[in-house]
Image (cartoon, grey):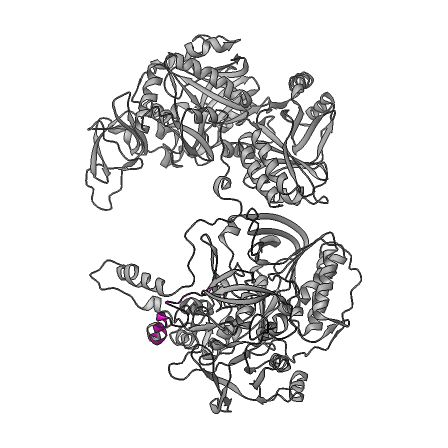
Amino acid sequence: MSAGAFRTATGGRIDRTHTLRFTFDGRPLQGCAGDTLASALLANGRHLVGRSFKYHRPRGIVTSGSEEPNALVTVVRDGGRTTPNLRATQVELYDGLTAISQNRWPSLTRDLGAINDKLSLMFPAGFYYKTFMGPRFLPENWAWTKVFEPAIRRAAGLGRAPTSADPDRYASRYAHCDVLVAGAGPAGLAAALAAAEAGARVIVADEQSEMGGSLLSASRGAINGVPTAQCAADALAQLAGHARVRLLPRTTVFGYFAQNMAGLAERISDHDPSPDPEGPRERLWQVRARHVVIATGAIERPLVFSNNDRPGIMLAGAALTYLNRYGVTPGQRAVIAGSHDGIYAAALDLAGVGVEVAAVLDTRADPQSAAMAAALDAGLPIRTGTCIVGSRGHLRVSEIMIGAPMADGSIRDAGRIPCDCLLMSGGWTPSVHLFSQSRGKLRFDAAAGVFLPGVSAQSETSAGACGGASGLAAVIESGAAAGRTAAQACGFGLGRARAYRVEGILEATEATGHVNAPRLPQGMAKAFVDFQNDVTSRDLELAAREGFRSIEHIKRYTTTGMATDQGKTSNMNALALVSGTLNTTVPDVGLTTFRQPYTPVTFGTLAGMARGDLFDPIRRTSIDGWAQGKGAAFEDVGTWKRAWYFPRAKEDMHAAVARECRTVRAAVGVFDASTLGKIEVVGPDAAEFLERMYVNAFKALKPGRCRYGILLNEAGFVIDDGVIARLAQDRFHVTTTTGGAASVLNMMEDYLQTEWPDLQVWLTSTTEQWAVIAVQGPRARDVIAPLVDGADVGGEALPHMSVCEAKVAGVPARLFRVSFTGELGFEINVPVGAGRSVWEAVAARVEDAGGCAYGTEAMHVLRAEKGYIIVGQETDGTVIPEDLGLGWAIGKSKADFVGRRSLVRPDMIRTDRKQLVGLLTRGRDVLLDDGAQVTSVAAPAKGTAALGHVTSSYHSSVLGKSIALALVRGGRGLMGQRLHVPMPKGAVEVEVVSPVFYDPKGEKLNG
Amino acid sequence: MASVDAAVSAGGGRDAGALVRAAAPAARFVFRGRDAAVATVASALGTPLSLEPCRASQSVGRIALWLGPDEWLLIAPRSEGGLVASVLAKALGGVPHALVDVSDRNSALIVSGPAVEDVLSAGCPLDLDQAAFPVGMCTRTLFAKAEIVLWRTAPAEFRVEVARSFLPYVEGVLAVAVRDGG
């Protein structure tokens, strides 16, 4: 035997010559190439792989696919590459794989947490809601947050997330196709072939490493005379030959979103023993499909009976897959039980490789099928009208108890059967997750006892078992038809239909099998419905008894179906149990919503490339390199990096900002204002347009002059401001705040296109065309004058708020005479490409003049000293110009402008609105907190409304005291009065003063 | 443009599926206006302006990318910038229009190679299949979190115009996409 005592001698799709070593909980084991971790463990006779979520019960492998509720493991590559909660059934084995079990201590076989199983009376349904109320003398929620929740979190739960940063990279891709096929089983492959042959662009995604689905697990049967597995290989080869088909194995369609957008998670390297360290681990695909073929198959249901969760108990279909695809037997002595013909195929195949079939139990009283007949012919011990009522065994099932349902509903004891594995089938549930995610309406098929796709909400087709098709022939036919329909929906011709002739299959008489009535446990025993969340039949009954009726409520109360497997194996059993308890029908109980993702998706996949330096664009000005060279500290302003301050030797931020401010006031400073938004407004109606947008009058503005513009929204509130220069009769250079650059342009374009399409004016963003070098201070003119060619920068030729075109340091420039410091100021606009060289020429002269570069912090202090507002700091979306003392800017004779009507609403003309004022503290060094509230008394009674709040607060080195701006109710009428600002260390008394702290007459503006 | 070279080597070293390089320096103008102005610009520039949405036109190295019903991005060799500006200004005379020099506003990258569609699809949500995005098509779109103008210049070549400050980001995402094969 190769790689495991439970490996068959031949058969399966594994490579027995290629042995892979791996460890499970430190124990070295061997598997074969082609194994999953689950199949390799089973080949070594290991069923016990984990402990359950709540009761710490020993659990084994139940399924062979992504629906696995129990076998969750942690796979460790190295420190940061530790992935918890992986389904062992989906983990591909590689040489050197290290897996550990979860939710146990100290070991899987001896787990102290298992005491929870004995204490289970403490954990009934809804125990979160019922218990853990602390004594009344303790603070609210104390007992829960300090005692119970931490304890429960330690004991319950699954694997632990790694604490180090994820070292892997994740790729992402947008893709478009005519037809997306989700699932590459028989229906999916037939659909993909039909669509591809009609000429459609097709993407086929399948969650498994090898495409083919159930075709890879069948031991018998042929399509057109070719064995099923070979048929899958042939179909894949044909698909690969189509240039417009993309095959994505190891790729889960995890979400079906609006407008036929699907989210796919592709696992690229997890299966690779030595992955390319530079390559991505996973890739997110965002696929826009014109039509989606959902071919996701069906999921087998467990039986609900006492102690139905012991290791060694697995689904019959899973056992078939392990046997026929992986060459693994589930044990030596098997009982096979259920209510679906699938049990006979499993029994026949297991018997065929020498597994002792102790019994085949059919709960149906009188089943009639070819499958059963074949099993009878083979001499298998079949008992009909027999159900399982319980199991025994510690870490592995050793015996099952059986019973015979009687006419009165009772069950007569029918003995015990020793075994080391039980293979069960409660029938099959069509996997309608993606259809439901697409917002399609499900319908309940009473005959089949399952929910099936009903009314579509998007362009999709469910094909194969997930659409209710029964038997391989019907599954393939529905797939092929869906593929043709899909191609046709995309405008392609129907083409010739392929003929599929299916032979030799043991077809089931029913597609899905009816949901079994649960065999309710006696005494303390538990019959599990939701294995992953440890929800028992008793929990569901209790919820029903306590008055819950809707499955949505029962789900949240009991947590059934809320685990990471989303109840793939449990939901139908839960519905059947609840409807039985409530004596109603399944559709009356309802169905919970299926949500994305179908299976868990890593955060890395969702984040993709957006991490580190690529998390967001990092925008730097052309002068940034100079500032970095000078050791500037930077701050983030939106996505821009802006020089914050320029510390010199041993200076901290406070000292640097203080020096920069004093230098600007005393001599001159140079500042990079390149990030300001800029919009070129051009056309014969440019002035008219700006007059309508801004509160100010612009038609009267002469070319060569500037005006401070205020922009309101429809509600009359200030949303942006900036200097607007008229360059020519039909050309304006508009500046916006750094943050408003894009939104102001959008708003203007919106008005032009929707309100005033008649205006002949056009907008162009020039934010990134111009580098802006602000030179501010009494010596600003001395600094720039020698650099300017072609313009007179004297006070008469270029007065405050004017603009001219000239060459600065040899570069064509727009030269503004403007100030945001209150000092004599210029802003030199040059094309960005020349920004650095012109800056260097200006900065050199600034230094020679005893000046310095200053950053955004000094800029903020300087403007606050002058009471100049910053939109977003002094405004918060509820502030009108009058509140800011800027009512003078409004063009009184204008017929209209955006927001004008709102400014005369009664609430806008009240005199007790919050108004911009200055605040001075008594202690000159006491700095108020930005955002602190302003109150009339030092300790207002609880519930007293504040008068306003501090909007800006700085220490002014020039004034030698701290200053603050604030919005205060009726503030302009409170000049000289004392108010209070409650702070963490007690209220601070403040005096209300004018918001202009420095040079109130504005004499410095003229140098 | 040192960072562009870095992007090339990052991609070229492992997988020659796509290459990213800087486009030649260019003069750029945004032209906006109505029919009369459009015709005037076309004849003065020597390049017809596409009236079909999202289509580029070019002649003698002068390019016009349709960006909107009244908006074109004009691109010319850097050395012709002054000439183009004066020729257009003269021709347009009294015809209402907007002509704005944005030569320094954008940078441009040329992305080419057999895997170019996959590489751009790492960040661009549009369908870049030739049937949906043929040679000569241009459009404003997104590349990851940056706005770009994308123009297909050949079956396996695109020009990406991007605002200057977004260039390092776009180069960074492209370098990763080239390395990952999209």
Vertical relation: A261 (above or below) A890: below
Image quarter of the N terminus of chain A: bottom right
Please say if A50 is above or below A794.
below
Q: How far across and down, in percent of the image, does residue A212 sit?
A: 66, 65
Residue A293 vertical position relative to residue A569 in the rendered view, above or below: above
A889 relative to B58 in the view: left or right: left
Q: In which quarter of the image is residue A102?
A: bottom left
Residue in the picture at 61% in, 89% down: A366
Magenta segment main secondary structure: loop
Q: Give the range drawn in magenta.
A: A100-119
Q: Which of A726 and A303 is in front in this view?
A: A303
Q: Where is residue A371 in the image (x, y as percent from the top left)?
A: 66, 83
Give the position of the C terminus of chain A as an image quadrant.
top left
Image point (43%, 82%), residue name: A521
Q: Residue at x 70, y 59 (%)?
A: A486
Q: Is residue B49 magenta?
A: no
Q: In this view, does A410 lie to the left or right of A346?
A: left
Looking at the image, which is closer to me, A623 or A954?
A623
